[in-house]
């Protein structure tokens, strides 16, 4: 049979509808949906959301009396109104959830990120860290206000890193140049067996060390380097063991103190955040107007209070989690094992006490950390107050802004902290933001910190932003201003960062250039037409230093080979061979210095 109130199928003979809960005794039950009695309002149904919606439906225009073709549409409209009313009430979110979701919206995943859309920065960074790649940076002195510096114009410094992940090889190159010539170049090669270093302009030798094959034995048999280290108090066995363990860790890809994984463990395994949410009290308050994307929007307000006790419990629970995290303890012990290995090799030269084990040091360090944190918590218990906020939420559930206030007790009296933050819309939540923090002492004077960002992005065309921050009491404020712009069409960019005191520039950095050969997430070349540092305070009146440069990053296109030259095994070589190399290097250094006087 069908319930006469909600028209749902129910068990024959039912005295109470299991769907809507209405008493069916005495009600006229029918197997037809047309028997639904929506025109009866009693004290029992008054205030029911569905019935309220039904009352609204009853006020719809009367259907024509001729024929029945309008009866079904009118009934359908009534049902839709009833359902909509019930749905709206049943899905009304808890104010606490509204506030939490509004805060989450600030950093919500999936927002437009111009640097990712244009350059694919995250993917490029990942490729450089995990795939075969190469990266280079070169800077050349172009001009300077100081004549003694400008004499070095055309002097350059370069750095290049080649990483062959598949073959486990790496080559780092550095060079110092002048007048378009390489004066000194440095090469450092590393694979899973050996390392090698060369400075061709100073020596014809390539200095090598095999650290994968019986390093301890090599040290013990070393005719000169090993004996020199031993005479200096070095424990060669401990030193060999240290390098072997470092090599094992590097080969296995083991990473100590992975902060990202620690944060994930904290979110999943600690109750601190959930307890703080539960302790929040949230109530609706008055609306407030915000300008979002150029239009004024009235945003619903929510008064939020987080008590002092809840905040203290949050700190205590977080402290307990981190101090009891077994992975963090294990990483610390393994790190201290390495440190102890190195200290053991050097103990006689530096006089270190190595009586403590890594486990003992971990326990002692953790106890010291706990004592320090408990001391901070004790101070917070006597100084901290409740935190009150007014949070304003847009119609789409995103954050419009919030203001906050709390007090803290100090020896000089109570200090009041208050401020507000607003979000002005744009390509993402952080595109246009204004915020401030006021620290007001008992004397009424306030230290004010402000931060504002305005940004615009037109996909496929341009990106620009300005960030300003101040710190001060309104008299001698410190300030920084950062501006940047980028044209997608031709890759042109310019940036400036200015630090000011009392509105007078102290240090200013200005760059301009263009990006070319851009393959999103894979490679790019950044050409700096100018990198100009200006500072009256540091470089004198109208002082400046100007550079040009280039940065490149992308897939590995070269074959990595060990540096060319005669091998010089730093452990197997004799004292006589060391003296010959030293003589060669001294003569070449003198020759290089003479080039600057020609």
Image (tube, grey):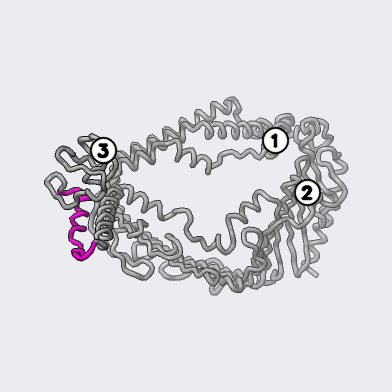
| Precedes in sequence: disc 2 or disc 1 | 2
Q: Percent from the top left, x then y, of residue 269?
A: 45, 35
Occupied quadrant, residue 403 = bottom left
Q: How many marks?
A: 3
Q: Percent from the top left, x then y, of residue 263?
A: 49, 42
Instruction: Quickly name the residue at label 2.
Output: 197
Front of the two marks 3 and 1: 3
Q: Secondary structure at mark 3?
A: loop
Where residue 91 is drawn, which disc sits there? Answer: none
Where residue 248 is drawn, which disc sits there? Answer: 1
Does residue 229 lie above or below 166 as drawn? above
Front of the two marks 2 and 1: 1
Closer to us: 386 or 15: 15
Mark 3 surroundings: few (<14), some (14-19) or many (≥20) residues within 10 A: some
Mark 2 surroundings: few (<14), some (14-19) or many (≥20) residues within 10 A: many
Please indicate, yes or no, whether residue 230 appears anywhere in the rendered image.
Answer: yes
Q: Residue at x 40, y 64 (%)?
A: 425
Q: Which range of residues does the magenta coloring cover?
A: 46-67
Mark 1 surroundings: few (<14), some (14-19) or many (≥20) residues within 10 A: few
Structural distance between the alpha carbons of marks 2 and 3: 83 Å
Q: Secondary structure at mark 1?
A: helix
Does residue 362 lie above or below 510 as drawn? above
For the N terminus, give its image quadrant.
top left
Instruction: Quickly name the residue at label 3.
Output: 18
Does residue 150 lie above or below 56 as drawn? below
Whether residue 66 appears in magenta in the rendering, the answer is: yes
Q: Are marks 2 and 1 in contact (CB under 8 Å)?
A: no
């Amino acid at each position: 049979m069908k319930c006469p109130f909600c028209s749902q199928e129910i068990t024959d003979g039912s005295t109470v509808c299991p769907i809507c809960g209405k008493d069916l005794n005495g009600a006229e039950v029918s197997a037809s949906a047309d028997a639904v009695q929506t025109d009866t309002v009693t004290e029992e149904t008054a205030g029911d959301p569905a019935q309220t919606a039904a009352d609204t439906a009853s006020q719809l225009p009367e259907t024509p009396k001729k024929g029945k073709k309008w009866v079904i549409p009118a009934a359908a409209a009534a049902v839709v109104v009833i359902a909509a009313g019930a749905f709206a009430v049943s899905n009304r979110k808890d104010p606490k959830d509204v506030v939490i979701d509004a805060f989450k919206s600030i950093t919500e995943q999936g927002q437009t990120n111009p640097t990712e859309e244009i350059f694919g920065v995250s993917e490029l960074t990942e490729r450089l860290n995990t795939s075969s790649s190469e990266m280079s940076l070169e800077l050349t002195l172009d001009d300077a206000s100081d004549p003694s510096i400008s004499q070095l114009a055309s002097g350059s410094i370069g750095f290049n890193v080649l990483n062959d992940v598949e073959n486990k090889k790496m080559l780092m190159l550095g060079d110092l140049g002048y007048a378009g010539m390489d004066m000194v170049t440095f090469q450092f090669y590393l694979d899973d067996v050996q390392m090698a270093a060369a400075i061709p302009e100073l020596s014809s030798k390539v200095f090598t060390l095999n650290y994968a094959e019986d390093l301890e034995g090599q040290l013990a048999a070393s005719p000169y380097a090993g004996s020199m280290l031993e005479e200096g108090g070095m424990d060669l066995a401990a030193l060999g063991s240290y390098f072997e363990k470092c090599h094992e860790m590097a080969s296995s890809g083991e990473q100590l103190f992975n902060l990202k994984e620690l944060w994930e463990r904290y979110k999943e395994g600690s109750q601190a955040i959930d307890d703080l949410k539960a302790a929040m009290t949230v109530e609706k308050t008055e609306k407030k107007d915000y300008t979002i994307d150029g239009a004024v929007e009235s945003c619903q307000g929510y008064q939020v209070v987080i008590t002092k006790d809840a905040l203290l419990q949050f700190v205590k629970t977080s402290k307990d989690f981190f101090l009891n995290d077994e992975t963090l303890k294990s990483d610390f012990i393994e790190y201290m094992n390495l440190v102890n290995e190195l200290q053991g090799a050097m103990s006689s030269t530096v006089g270190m006490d190595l009586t403590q084990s890594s486990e003992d040091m971990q326990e002692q360090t953790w106890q010291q950390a706990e004592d320090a944190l408990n001391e901070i918590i004790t101070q917070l218990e006597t100084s901290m107050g409740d935190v009150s906020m007014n949070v304003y939420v847009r119609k789409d559930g995103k954050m419009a802004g919030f203001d906050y206030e709390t007090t803290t007790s100090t020896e000089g009296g109570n200090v009041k902290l208050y401020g507000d933050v607003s979000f002005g819309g744009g390509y993402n939540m952080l595109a246009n933001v204004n915020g401030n923090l006021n620290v007001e002492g008992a004397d009424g004077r306030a230290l004010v910190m402000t931060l504002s960002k305005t940004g615009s992005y037109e996909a496929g065309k341009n990106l620009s932003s300005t960030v300003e921050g101040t710190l001060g009491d309104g008299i001698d404020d410190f300030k920084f201003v950062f501006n940047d712009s980028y044209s997608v069409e031709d890759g042109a960019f310019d940036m400036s960062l200015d630090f000011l005191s009392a509105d007078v520039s102290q240090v200013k950095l200005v760059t301009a250039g263009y990006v070319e050969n851009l393959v999103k997430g894979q490679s790019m070349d950044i050409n700096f037409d100018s990198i100009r540092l200006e500072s009256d305070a540091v470089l004198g009146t109208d002082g400046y230093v100007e550079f040009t440069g280039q940065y490149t990053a992308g897939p590995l296109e070269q074959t990595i080979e060990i540096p060319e030259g005669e091998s010089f095994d730093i452990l197997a070589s004799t004292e006589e061979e060391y003296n010959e190399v030293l003589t060669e290097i001294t003569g070449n250094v003198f020759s290089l210095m003479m080039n600057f006087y020609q």
